[in-house]
Amino acid sequence: MVIRGILLAAGSSSRFGANKLMHPLPEGKLAGVPIAVASARNLAAALPNPIAVVRPGVPALEAALREAGCEVVVCPDADQGMGASLACAVAASVDAFGWVVALADMPYIAPDTIRSVAHWIGDGAVIAAPVHKGSRGHPVGLTEWVREELLSLRGDEGARRILQRHAGSIQMIPVDDPGCLKDIDTPQDLQP
């Protein structure tokens, strides 16, 4: 039973004002590491051979994500939004029983959190997500039971409607990982 990690790295960084995914993290043990590379390393540490989805025309990002342990898939429809990128990744992983979907702008998720989500998916949950201090975080795990819904995604909301449609089937996993809630949308999000 194959569970693939998916790193969604095809966004346009419009709120950041520059290519945030290659922007170096400012502090701690990750100081100097590009945001997407830190996210990819965490995913690759938890699940072998994750897929990173990128937009066309970002060779430096492609190379950095490959070096971080990802198989890179270029999504020609990335401008349509996160839904198109997620559908592209699912289509590129026909061997998978399930997926753990992480966002490239969330570099602080602990590999143990990713492994926990994958465990619950492998153990029969249709959808699984971490919860930290009462808030649902990332990554989100989904199984083949929602494959067709994932393949039909378009637009910029990712899997939100799938999660709403199957809300009663989501296995919430308590974690002690504030990183599962911390994304980087603007330069201010990098401030300590």
Image: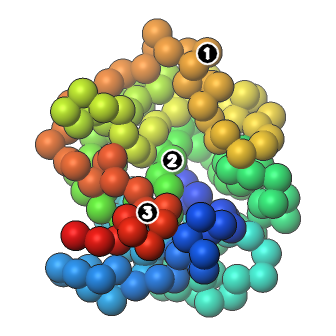
Distance in Å between CA atoms under marks 2 and 1: 18 Å
Secondary structure type for disc 3: loop
User: N-terminal of the two: label 3 or label 1?
Assistant: 1
> In this image, 136 relative to 12: left or right?
left
Q: Relative to 146, does residue 45 appear above or below in the rendering?
A: below
Secondary structure type for disc 2: strand
Given the image, on which type of amino acid does mark 1 rest? Arg
Query: Which residue is denoted by mark 2 in the rendering?
Result: 101
Which residue occupies 43% across, 20% down? 170
Distance in Å between CA atoms under marks 3 and 1: 27 Å
**Mark sitting on residue 56:** none
Looking at this view, is 153 or 183 the one in front?
A: 183
Residue 142 percent coordinates (x, y): 52, 33
Residue 174 percent coordinates (x, y): 21, 31
Residue 27 percent coordinates (x, y): 22, 81
Q: Residues within 10 Å of mark 1 (few under 14, many from 20)?
A: few
Q: Residues within 10 Å of mark 3 (few under 14, many from 20)?
A: many
Q: Residue furthest front?
A: 188
Secondary structure type for disc 1: helix
Distance in Å between CA atoms under marks 3 and 2: 17 Å
